[in-house]
Amino acid sequence: MKKVNIEFTLSPEYKNQFVDIQKRTSSLSFELQDGKHTITTKPVDIGRLLYFNNSILQAYLSFSYEFDAESKTITLCGMDFETKDAMRLTTYPKGTTEYCHQGYSKCTIDDESSMYNSNWNYNTQMTPNLESLFVDVIKDANNTLLEAIKKLEGLTIKIKTLPPKLPSEVYLNTLLVYTGGKFTGIYDPNKNYAEGYSLKSIESVWGGIVTFTYGENFANVIGSTHDPHIASKSWIKLWEGQYGTATTCTSLNYNGFVCNVSSGLVGGHVITGKVAKVMPAGSDVYIMPICTAHNNNDNVYMAALQYTGVWLKNYLH
């Protein structure tokens, strides 16, 4: 099993007449295990609450990951994907259950019937700017985690994120058309659809971003679009909405295959491995910028020589 060793910054320097917090770190070591797991660092004393009987303030970080040992794929939350699985910082007076859980956008407490604890709250005027400093701790911790994971060889890394903000025209060209509950193509704003169709937005299939190991092989998804013109325009624009303009094929001239980049790039639906396949509805697939020569040839496989990809979940579901 692959082992992860990390040194997190757990708290910032912060002091006023009410609290005294010192910069502290926390070491974490764990092995990647198959399945979904929640990791929690050991509680560390980070300071004192001068206003509350000089109580010791403790803190710890927690996050969840999912690992598929067979495909060597790990899934984590990005900084804009705020769920219970995302990185969060928990602080509390030692010996109490007055927990404050800091996420990227808000602080929550365990008592769902209230917005504040009796004694420990830092999103008040007693501790101005402390919450934003705790948010910085979380962002730094998540970046530290991702960098540590990227140093492990042979992993495919999926990061849950929100989809990019797209221009209206591009967004409409990513809508998925279903008839009778089955996927029938990409939405064409210039087409009149018969009754009984439904649309799904990109939000329903967006998973996040994916980083492959350099040189990792991937192949086409057979039958991934019903309208190559609309689809190629849609998916490369989606990728570029996340990363910026693509300038070359991800698998440029790999293994002797001659790319035709000058003819334009498309957002190719791909899967890991060397064999192009028809993927069942609900599968994970990825979008990578590839040349039309690669996109139109299911008999060749490719390699990740540049770029990070877009991860689509619930493919055609």
Image (cartoon, rainbow, N blue to C red):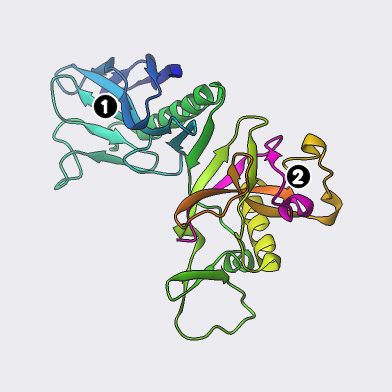
Q: Quadrant of residue 30?
A: top left
Question: Is 240 on the left-hand or right-hand side of 310?
Answer: right
For the magenta stretch, what is the residue range?
A: 291-317
Quadrant of image for the C terminus: bottom left
Disc number at residue 91?
A: 1
Q: In this view, does 227 lie to the left or right of 60?
A: right
Is 205 rendered above or below residue 142? Answer: below
Q: Which residue is drawn at 44% across and 36% down?
A: 76
Q: Earlier in the sequence, mark 2 or mark 1?
A: 1
The span from disc 2 to disc 1 (Cα, nearest Å) is: 47 Å
Tag 2 residue: 249
Height in image: 227 above or below 277? below
Q: Is mark 1 on a helix, strand or loop?
A: strand
| Other-residue count near label 1 (Cα within 10 Å), few / some / many at <14 / 14–19 / ≥20 | many
- Is residue 301 covered in magenta? yes
Under mark 1, the amino acid is Thr
Q: Can residue 143 be seen in this view?
A: yes
